[in-house]
Amino acid sequence: MTTLLWLKAFHVIFMVAWFAGIFYLPRLFVNHAETDNKDVANHLKGMERRLLYFITPFGILTIVLGLALIHYYGMAWFAASHWLHIKLTLVIFLVIYHLYCFKLLKTFAEDKNTRSGRFYRIFNEIPVLILFAVIILVYLKPTF
């Protein structure tokens, strides 16, 4: 039981760290998209790059520990946990979102952004919705 609790604790710790960065990065993109100041834009480029590369290991560790939890509980549990299948689908969408942030990072680094701050404000809401759904699935474990 102790191993399970440690796995769960670190899974949640790394998930929180990952989401903190995923929530903040698009806010930097908003500021970057709305500035005309070259010095501010260059400063934001550095912040965006450092943040994305800082949080990427948290995402990887969240996934690895989640897979370890699935392994710990076993395949019979996994097959019966339909809520978990939905959660994993949402995690896949979050990984795609995270990887897309690398594309956006490159776009800003090359000064090729054509999107507005409003786009990035809306883009920023995607992980919030995923987090809400994941938390509800994990704690309520609805049956389908």
Image: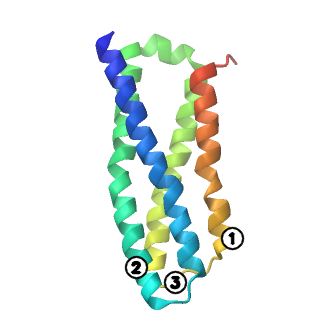
Give the number of the mark in front: 1 or 3.
1
Residue 73, position as x, y percentages in the image: 41, 14
Q: Which residue is at a point 61% across and 27% down the rendered structure image?
A: 137
The CA span between labels 3 and 2 is 16 Å
Quarter holding the N terminus is: top left
Circle 3 SS class:
loop
Taking the image as shown, residue 92 lies to the left or right of residue 47, namely right
Front one among 75 and 128 = 128
Give the number of the mark in front: 3 or 2.
2
The CA span between labels 2 and 1 is 21 Å
Residue 2, position as x, y percentages in the image: 30, 13
- In the rendered image, the vertical position of residue 139 relative to residue 58, given as above or below: above
The answer to which quarter of the image holds residue 143 is top right
Q: Amino acid at mark 1?
A: Arg
Q: Earlier in the sequence, mark 2 or mark 1?
A: 2
Circle 2 SS class:
helix
Residue 110 visible in the shown view: no
- In the rendered image, the vertical position of residue 57 relative to residue 90, given as above or below: below
Q: Which mark is residue 112?
A: 3
Q: Which mark is residue 43?
A: 2
Q: Earlier in the sequence, mark 3 or mark 2?
A: 2
Q: Amino acid at mark 3?
A: Lys
Q: Which residue is mark 1?
A: 118
The CA span between labels 1 and 3 is 17 Å
Q: Amino acid at mark 2?
A: His
Quarter holding the C terminus is: top right
- In the rendered image, the vertical position of residue 47 relative to residue 37, given as above or below: above
